Amino acid sequence: MQEPPVVSFYERASSFYARLALRRFNSLATYRDETLRGYFRTEAAFSDYYAELAAALQDAHFEQNRPVEMQVLEFALDGPGAARVRSRFEGRNGLPLRPGSVTLEREDQWERLEGRWWIIPGKF
C-alpha cells in the first residue's frame, strides 16, 4: 500500500532539512553532497537553490556561512501536489566588532511530480 502524499511530503521534507542543518554553505563538501542533490529534479534546480541560499546567508552576515541552529517553523500543504516549508536559520554574526547572532527565515516551495516531492527553487 502506498503512503498518503501528506505523509511522504512530511518524511521527505523532514529528511532534507535534517540534512541541511548545521552545514557550512560556502563549502565544496556541502555543494557536492549527493544526498542533498537528490531532493531536486535537476542539477540546475539544485545549483539555483544552493546559490540563492548561500547568498542569503552571506547577505545576512552569517559567520563562515554556517548556521549554528536550524528550525522548521511550518509544514503547509497548499493543495494537491503543492506544499511549502518555512524555516529559520540562526548563527553568529560574521561582521567585525558585531558580536551576537543573526537569523534568516525563508520559505521553500515543494511540488509533487510523478509521485515524488521535489523542492522547486525560485518560487518564493
Image (cartoon, rainbow, N blue to C red):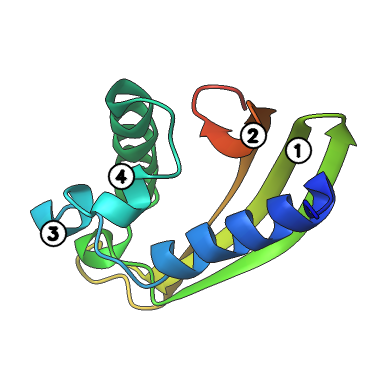
The secondary element bearing badge 3 is classed as helix
- Tally of marks: 4
Say which residue label 2 marks: 109
Q: Earlier in the sequence, mark 4 or mark 2?
A: 4
Q: Secondary structure at mark 1?
A: strand
Question: Residue under circle 1?
Answer: 83
Q: Quadrant of the N terminus?
A: bottom right
The residues bearing labels 3 and 4 have C-alpha atoms spaced at a distance of 13 Å
Question: Residue visible at 86% across and 33% down?
Answer: 78
Residue 114 coordinates in the image, percent (x, y)? 63, 26
Indicate the quadrant containing the C terminus: top left, top right, bottom left or bottom right: top right
Q: Amino acid at mark 1?
A: Ala
How far apart marks 4 and 2 lie (CA) works out to 17 Å
Q: Earlier in the sequence, mark 4 or mark 1?
A: 4
Q: Place residue 37 in its image quadrant.
A: top left
Mark 1 nearby-residue class (10 Å; few <14, some 14–19, many ≥20): many
How packed mark 2 is, by other alpha carbons closer than 10 Å (few <14, some 14-19, many 20 or more), is some
Q: Give the alpha-carbon distance from disc 2 to disc 1, as whole Å.
A: 6 Å
Q: Which residue is mark 4?
A: 54
Farthest residue toward the left? 28
Give, as a three-letter code, the residue at label 2. Gln
Disc 3 target residue = 29
Q: Earlier in the sequence, mark 1 or mark 3?
A: 3
Label 2 close to label 1 by CB (< 8 Å): yes
Residue 12 spot, x, y in % from top left: 60, 56
